[in-house]
Image (cartoon, rainbow, N blue to C red):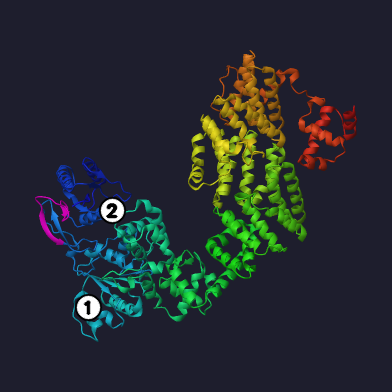
């Protein structure tokens, strides 16, 4: 026989762990393929040749004879068509073997075997002939040792091992266990399987009674008596039956109890009262509601189990169709009957065609199999069986539940189901397995929901039910809306569980002739689309809502435009000017709160190309919000100011802003903006010498973003943390952190923010210079959409370093020139200093004087803006210059100080760091080294007083003060607070020896 032959082996009874280890060692010496399984309770070996398997069984038996506990070893060999069913059947054969036995099925050809006759395995298949390769006197532990009439199953039992184990426990300790579930969920098969596995517990038998055809309660006892094989008389059957069962130890399995549920309950109660050693295992679409009853709701098959069932019933594997089969299993809710009906079509259709055909599942899922009950011939018939047992009120509530998508609550049921005593009726539907109860929420299986929807349409109630559904969810959403300003976590908890229902309500509302309710719902749900990476879907709904009333000039339209702009900020910032239109409308309406919110969004739109305009818009929005006392709108504008101040490296001004808004954003649940602000804070800490603290704050930023499940926010936060890890030398951790984002970009084509920048930095820091350049090409290319923004400037210093390390000097020079030009245009001191520092290094060999000017300009910029971390780079560059100009002692001192500062701060050296002289002297502190190098430059350094001592920012402040601008006006012009202006003027007065603006103006004229 062709196919596969499986050998399984295990000990009978309990043995020590060393015995199992010895067995595994013996099996490892056998030829054949050893299977590695998650549920590996015993070794499994697969062979192509049955003769080889038989020889291996003999060898294993002989080897086991020489080890402790070897006499307890059982071995089973079976040949089948495919691997998984063959392993399962071999394990069932092993289960009936006694210690010391080696058993073969008839499918395995072998010499010198003993025919043990026909036996029934516990998989409930037909009896089959069993052979023994060994010679023992013990009888097999097959199903035949216990009296029973368990039904023959012509297909294999798949999965449900967890449920079987739990049910064995329940049935061992309880006399009444009822399996409930909708039609087709596998109640009958599961009950029969657990009865077969536990059959030896009941010496007087396991008796199966199918009640599907029983229509009168008086017939129940007669059906049981016929199954057990005892004589009763019509009219007195129950008393006579109970009398004969009273002294027996038996299990009675009552299948399909639902259509005579009251009669079954009465009969079972009598059995429990009169027959103390008789247990009952029942299957029903609703519980019996008896004292002591254990109700076990049969769950859907797990996804992998469902796929296995489909493939086995199809009789063939379809590796190229795995996606389609998985979709079929999901759409059919893992319901065994539906999966078997679908698998029957593989003789005619491909899995992909079956998947498409499920759009009409009730038309597709039919079969004409002889010997199968009519209610199992079609999916419709299976559910009809349950539906026909409902009373009119139950049918009314049941069909209205079809309007719910996904789960729903009792409050929603009350609102949608127009019936008296609706909760009592609903509870009965739960009991009848038509509704699934899960952790305080409820749902219909998709197949049941589709059936109910057909009945709802037939009753002419579909539109009315959808209207009630829309009204309810609109009311919930609008009632929760104030939480968006105060507690977004509470808003999310109230709204997100019903995401599917909100989708359905939006579709109905926006498709209606009067779209008013749909538009209101779209406005109320605006923040929902910032969660779970559903931004594109959200702007689709919001755009539809806006365009259903394009001439509307009310607050509702402004709210819709605001919603669109907030969602589009991360998914389509340039696609539609909702923020600009919204600002115009909010101004027209005189709504300062909306104006303030729109100003922040318009500022974000200007951010990439015009920092000054963005600052002015955010400043105006902040003033408006503070004027009306709206913290939410204020924080949105301050958050953008934080980003700008950070880019300008005005860190002393940044910290008060961060402290002003961060906790409020986190407390209110505004995770997106909070994550952005924390990311800015972490970068500021990294620049100003607090790298370890920066990593901790970046971890907070990621923790704030992750619950949003939005790859834009999460991607930005992960990227920031990964970049900091790379700068601290933790490159493996940085790559691991970015791995999910790389997979997302590769498999889904997602555009992950800053992916190129972060991976470019990680690659450069890893010495992978060509990869670093390639990662950054998209953002730095001259024909990139970002070419005329500030973005390339942020990447170009890393690109230039990688180019130079890779020997591409000319390209590195071009990149640095461009970086310096963009940094000056957008006032990016850190980037400018990076570019100047690298330019200076490149000129050390040929133009040391010019190199010195550039390196000291970079150093001065870093000092003036508090960029303490990057002072280390300046010290190393100046050490390189000193070494080249024969000042080796200075070079060693600076290099020594830089190395000590790196070790203290955690700022890792890049792989292309030059080799510098060393010294045994104690290292200077970072501040001492900077002061030393600036002193040693002599006249080239900035003096301590006089006009030449003023920093570039101080010179700008002086020019505006002399023009007559007030401190607030100077702050507005230079994007700084009035307190910062006052501080700069105090420094200027001290350096120039003047006391006030009048003296300053006079000195300036002189």
Closer to the camera in the image, 736 or 653: 736
Residue 863's image quarter? top right
- The picture places residue 625, in percent across and down from the top left corner, at 74, 53
In the picture as drawn, the residue positioned furthest to the front comes out as 348
Please name which of the two marks, 2 or 1, marks the residue nearer to the observer. Answer: 2
Category of crowding for the residue at label 1, using alpha-carbon neighbours closer than 10 angstroms: few (below 14), some (14–19), many (at least 20): many
The span shown in magenta is 99-118
Q: Percent x, y for residue 255?
A: 30, 72
Say left or right for 110 vs 447.
left
**Residue 343 in view of the camera:** yes
Judge whether 898 appears above or below 380 on screen.
above
| Residue at point 45%, 81% (across, down) | 392
Which residue is the extreme one toward the top? 886
- 20 left or right of 300? left
Give the quarter of the image for residue 139. bottom left
Any part of residue 332 in sight? no
Residue 70 lies, with reference to residue 263, above or below; the image says above
Q: Secondary structure at mark 1?
A: helix
> Tag 2, which secondary structure?
helix
Q: Position of residue 880 (x, y in %)?
A: 62, 19
Residue 751's label in the rendered image is none
Horizontal and vertical percent position of residue 91:
24, 54
Residue most toward the left? 112
Instruction: Say which of 246 and 574 sits in front.
Output: 574
Alpha-carbon span between mark 2 and mark 1 = 39 Å
At 20% from the left and 67% from the top, the residue drawn is 203
Residue picked out by circle 1: 225
Confirm whether the magenta stretch covers residue 804. Answer: no
What residue is pinned by disc 2?
84
The image quadrant of residue 256 is: bottom left
Position of residue 524 in the picture relative to residue 94 (left or right): right
């Amino acid at each position: 026989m062709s196919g596969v032959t499986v050998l399984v082996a295990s000990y009978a009874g309990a043995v020590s762990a060393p015995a199992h280890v010895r067995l595994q060692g013996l099996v490892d010496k056998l030829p054949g393929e050893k299977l590695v399984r998650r549920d590996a309770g015993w070794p499994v070996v697969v062979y192509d040749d049955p003769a080889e398997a038989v020889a291996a069984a003999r060898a294993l038996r002989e080897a086991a004879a020489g080890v402790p506990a070897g006499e307890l070893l059982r071995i089973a060999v079976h040949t089948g068509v495919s691997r998984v069913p063959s392993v399962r059947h071999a394990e069932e054969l092993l289960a009936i073997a006694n210690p010391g036995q080696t058993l073969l099925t008839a499918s395995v050809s072998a010499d010198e075997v003993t025919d043990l006759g026909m036996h029934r395995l516990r998989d409930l298949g037909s009896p089959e002939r069993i052979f023994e390769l060994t010679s023992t006197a013990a009888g097999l532990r097959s199903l035949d040792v216990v009296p029973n009439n368990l039904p023959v199953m012509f297909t294999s039992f798949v999965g449900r091992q967890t449920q079987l184990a739990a049910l064995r426990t329940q049935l061992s300790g309880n006399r009444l266990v009822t399996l409930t579930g909708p039609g087709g969920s596998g109640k009958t098969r599961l009950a029969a399987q657990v009865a077969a596995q536990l059959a030896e517990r009941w010496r007087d038998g396991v008796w199966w009674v199918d009640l599907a055809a029983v229509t009168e309660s008086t017939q129940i006892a007669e059906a049981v008596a016929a199954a057990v094989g005892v004589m009763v008389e019509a009219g007195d059957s129950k008393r006579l039956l109970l009398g004969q069962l009273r002294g027996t130890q038996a299990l009675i399995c009552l299948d399909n109890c639902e259509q005579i549920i009251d009669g079954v309950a009465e009969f079972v109660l009598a059995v429990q009262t009169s027959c103390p050693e008789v247990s009952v295992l029942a299957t029903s679409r609703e519980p019996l509601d008896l004292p002591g009853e254990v109700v076990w709701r049969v769950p859907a098959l797990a996804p992998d189990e469902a796929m296995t069932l489909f493939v086995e019933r199809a009789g063939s594997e379809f590796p190229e169709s795995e996606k389609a089969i998985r979709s079929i299993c999901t759409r059919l809710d893992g319901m065994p009957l539906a999966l078997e009906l679908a698998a029957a079509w593989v003789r005619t259709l491909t899995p992909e065609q079956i998947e498409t055909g499920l759009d009409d599942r009730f038309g597709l899922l039919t079969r004409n199999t002889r010997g199968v009950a009519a209610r199992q011939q079609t999916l419709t018939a299976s559910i009809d069986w349950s539906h026909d047992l409902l009373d009119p009120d139950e049918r009314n509530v049941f069909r209205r539940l079809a309007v719910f998508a996904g789960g729903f609550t009792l409050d929603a049921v009350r609102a949608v189901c127009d019936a008296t005593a609706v909760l009592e009726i609903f509870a009965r539907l739960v009991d009848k397995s038509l509704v699934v109860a899960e952790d305080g929420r409820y749902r219909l299986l998709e197949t049941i929901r589709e059936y109910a929807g057909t009945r709802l349409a037939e009753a002419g109630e579909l539109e009315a039910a959808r209207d009630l559904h829309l009204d309810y969810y609109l009311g919930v959403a609008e009632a929760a809306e104030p939480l968006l300003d105060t507690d977004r976590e509470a808003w999310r908890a109230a709204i997100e569980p019903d995401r599917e229902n909100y989708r359905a309500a939006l579709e109905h509302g926006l498709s209606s002739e009067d779209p008013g309710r749909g538009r209101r719902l779209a406005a109320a749900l605006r923040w929902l689309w910032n969660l779970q990476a559903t931004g594109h879907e959200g702007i689709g709904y919001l755009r539809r809502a806006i365009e259903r009333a394009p001439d509307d000039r009310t607050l509702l339209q402004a709210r819709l435009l605001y919603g669109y702009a907030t969602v589009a900020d991360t998914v389509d910032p340039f696609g539609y000017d909702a923020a600009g239109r919204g600002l115009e409308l909010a101004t027209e309406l005189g709504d300062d709160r909306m104006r303030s919110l729109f100003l922040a969004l318009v500022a974000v739109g200007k951010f990439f190309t015009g920092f000054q305009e963005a600052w002015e818009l955010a400043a105006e929005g902040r003033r408006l919000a503070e004027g009306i006392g709206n913290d939410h709108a204020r924080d949105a504008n301050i958050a953008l100011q934080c980003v700008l101040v950070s880019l300008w490296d005005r860190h002393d001004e940044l910290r008060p802003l961060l402290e002003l808004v961060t906790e409020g954003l986190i407390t209110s649940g505004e995770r997106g903006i909070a994550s952005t602000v924390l990311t800015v804070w972490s970068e500021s800490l990294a620049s100003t010498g607090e790298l370890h603290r920066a990593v901790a704050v970046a971890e907070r930023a990621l923790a704030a973003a992750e619950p949003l499940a939005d790859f834009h926010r999460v991607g930005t936060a992960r990227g920031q943390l990964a970049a900091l890890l790379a700068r601290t030398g933790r490159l493996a951790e940085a790559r691991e952190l970015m791995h999910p984002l790389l997979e997302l970009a590769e498999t889904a084509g997602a555009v992950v923010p800053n992916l190129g920048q972060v991976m470019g930095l990680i690659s450069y820091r890893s010495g992978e210079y060509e990869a670093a350049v390639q990662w950054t090409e998209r953002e730095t290319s001259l024909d990139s959409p970002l070419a005329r923004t500030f973005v390339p400037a942020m990447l170009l210093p890393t690109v230039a370093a990688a180019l130079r390390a890779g020997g591409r000097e000319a390209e590195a020079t071009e990149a640095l020139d461009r970086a310096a030009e963009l940094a000056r245009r957008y006032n990016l001191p850190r980037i400018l200093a990076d570019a100047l520092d690298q330019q200076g290094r490149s000129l050390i060999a040929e133009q040391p004087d010019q190199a010195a000017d550039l390196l000291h300009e970079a150093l001065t910029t870093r000092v003036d803006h508090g960029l303490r971390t990057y002072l280390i780079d300046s010290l190393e560059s100046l050490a390189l210059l000193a070494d080249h100009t024969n000042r080796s002692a200075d070079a060693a001192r600076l290099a020594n100080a830089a190395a000590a500062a790196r070790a203290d701060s955690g700022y890792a050296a890049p792989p292309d760091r030059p080799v510098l002289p060393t010294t045994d002297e104690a290292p200077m502190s970072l501040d001492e080294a900077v002061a030393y190098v600036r002193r040693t430059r002599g006249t080239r350094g900035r003096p301590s007083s006089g006009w030449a001592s003023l920093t570039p920012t101080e010179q700008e402040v002086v020019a505006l003060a002399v023009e007559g601008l007030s401190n607030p006006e100077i702050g507005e012009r230079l994007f700084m607070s009035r307190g910062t202006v006052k501080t700069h003027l105090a420094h200027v007065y001290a350096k120039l020896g003047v006391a006030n603006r009048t003296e300053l103006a006079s000195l300036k004229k002189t």
